Amino acid sequence: MQLANLPTPPESVPINMLVKVKGTPLENNDDVEPFDFIRTIAVARIMMPTSHVRLSAGREQMSEQTQAMCFMAGANSIFYGCKLLITPNPKEDKDLILFRKLSLNPQQTETEAGDNQQQMRLAQQVLEADTEQFYNAAV
């Protein structure tokens, strides 16, 4: 409700399926029922019609059918690539196969670099002291 009531709707609304990670407070929680998750997507779409409703963490554990229902309920974006913060994403080919089955056409976007190149670039910048984007707070 809070996101939907912002003066300007959010550009992106990532919605995560619970991923149980050992050692975290939610590791022993019950699984989220797929239909409850799908309803969450539908409510987000109704309340934020101009936002990108993104399927985020947990897609690796979702069946193709659950993901398909999420798209039909209003999800119109995914996080694509190797890994989110701590959880893996489905392989890119797996996503493309699902998109073909559902007749979904991914929006083409341009990036400066792929995931691995970007990660190497960021690691190098962190190692170099004081750049425009980073500074070494330990010095």
Image (cartoon, grey):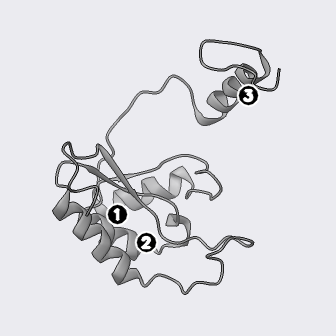
Q: Tag 2's secondary structure?
A: helix
Mark 3 Cα within 10 Å, few/some/many (few <14, many 20+)? few
The three-letter amino acid code for the residue at tag 2 is Glu
- Looking at the picture, how far across and down is residue 62, in whole percent? 49, 73
Going from N to C along the chain, the mark reached first, 3 or 1, is 1
List the residue tagged with mark 1.
101
Residue at position x 63%, y 74% in the image: 20
Going from N to C along the chain, the mark reached first, 1 or 2, is 2
CB atoms at circles 1 and 2 under 8 Å apart? yes
Horizontal relation, residue 28 to residue 17: left or right: right
Residue at position x 73%, y 28% in the image: 123
- Looking at the picture, how far across and down is residue 90, in whole percent? 55, 58
The three-letter amino acid code for the residue at tag 3 is Ala
Which mark is drawn over residue 64? 2
Q: Is residue 15 above or below residue 93?
A: below
Whether residue 35 is visible, yes or no, is yes
Going from N to C along the chain, the mark reached first, 2 or 3, is 2
Q: CA distance from mark 3 to mark 1?
A: 38 Å
List the residue tagged with mark 3.
123
Whether residue 73 is visible, yes or no, is no
Residue at position x 60%, y 36% in the image: 115
